[in-house]
């Protein structure tokens, strides 16, 4: 079955710096890769997603890149702000969504 | 997300007790899920249901059961709780959005402690 590895487990950056979180997946049939942000005491919320027919997608300060050959995808946050501090999860699915396999999570801390 | 509600939000119970966690959604989606979150392990799928008559086991279904009472309601039961079921439990629902992806929406979670 699908397996998703996420690194790093913790990441600390200064406000204004960029942050990058990386994930690898095992099943080449996976075709949908969402990223979720989980704030303290809340459930995960979708922040951006990418499908396998696209190499990069941007939404304001966040972007996701996908390398299907290497089975890697990454989340990039530019100009980080303290409110970006949260736990971020990547996930993969082979059915344009539905049943997701999640990475282990990255705790991002943005220091003012 | 107010569209997905979970009750209770916190529960402390003892080993051997039967526990039910409830989930309701107002998004009108057919698909619902139960996940468990443990530190360092991410979210792991316990059970999922693609419609009222469809129930499927996820990665870690042992020790759990579910009931899909209606399109909007999906409950998770621990028949005889044990301490290693202490975790944060999330319900989610999904439906195809305008982009063609089956996006998942999560509830606020239930923190369960088994003593």
Image (spheres, helix red, strand yellow):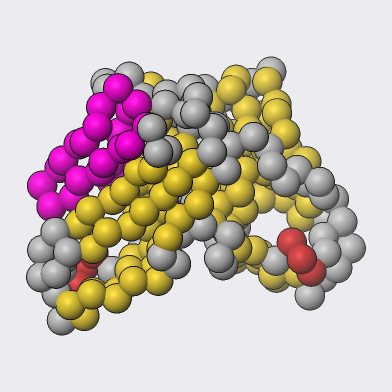
Q: Quadrant of residue A34?
A: top left
Is residue B101 toward the left or the right of residue A18 in the image?
right
Residue for point 24% across, 32% down: A55
Residue extent of the magenta highlight: A40-68
Q: Is residue B33 visible?
A: no
Give coordinates of residue B23: x percent, y percent. Answer: 57, 43
Give coordinates of residue A52: x percent, y percent. Answer: 34, 26
Residue for point 27% across, 59% down: A20
Residue for point 40% across, 38% down: A70
Q: Is residue A46 above or below residue B12?
A: above
Q: Determine if the magenta segment contains residue A67.
A: yes
Q: Is residue B114 visible?
A: yes
Q: Determine if the magenta segment contains residue A28.
A: no
Looking at this view, is B90 or A19 the one in front? Answer: A19
Is residue A50 toward the left or the right of residue A56 in the image?
right
Give coordinates of residue B36: x percent, y percent. Answer: 62, 53
Residue with the most extreme bottom position: A112
How many numbered marks, from 0 up? Answer: 0
Looking at this view, is A58 or B8 the one in front? Answer: A58
């Amino acid at each position: 079955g699908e397996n998703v590895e996420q690194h790093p487990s913790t990441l600390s950056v200064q406000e204004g710096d960029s942050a990058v979180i990386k994930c690898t997946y095992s099943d080449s049939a996976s075709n949908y890769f969402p990223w979720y942000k989980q704030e303290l005491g809340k459930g995960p919320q979708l922040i951006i997603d990418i499908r396998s027919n696209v190499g990069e997608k941007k939404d304001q300060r966040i972007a996701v890149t996908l390398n299907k050959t290497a089975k890697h995808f990454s989340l990039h946050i530019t100009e980080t702000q303290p409110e970006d501090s949260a736990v971020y999860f990547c996930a993969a699915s082979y059915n344009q969504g539905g049943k997701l396999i999640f990475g282990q999570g990255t705790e991002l801390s943005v220091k003012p | 997300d107010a569209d997905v509600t979970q009750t209770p939000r916190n529960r402390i119970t003892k080993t051997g007790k039967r526990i039910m966690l409830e989930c309701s959604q107002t998004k009108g989606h057919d698909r619902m899920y139960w996940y468990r979150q443990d530190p360092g392990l991410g979210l792991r799928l316990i059970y999922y249901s693609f419609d009222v008559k469809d129930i499927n086991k996820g990665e870690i279904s042992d020790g759990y059961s579910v009931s899909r009472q209606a399109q909007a309601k999906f409950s998770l039961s621990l028949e005889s709780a044990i301490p290693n079921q202490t975790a944060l439990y999330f319900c989610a629902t999904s439906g195809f959005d305008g982009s063609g992806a089956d996006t998942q929406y999560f509830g606020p979670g239930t923190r369960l402690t088994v003593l």
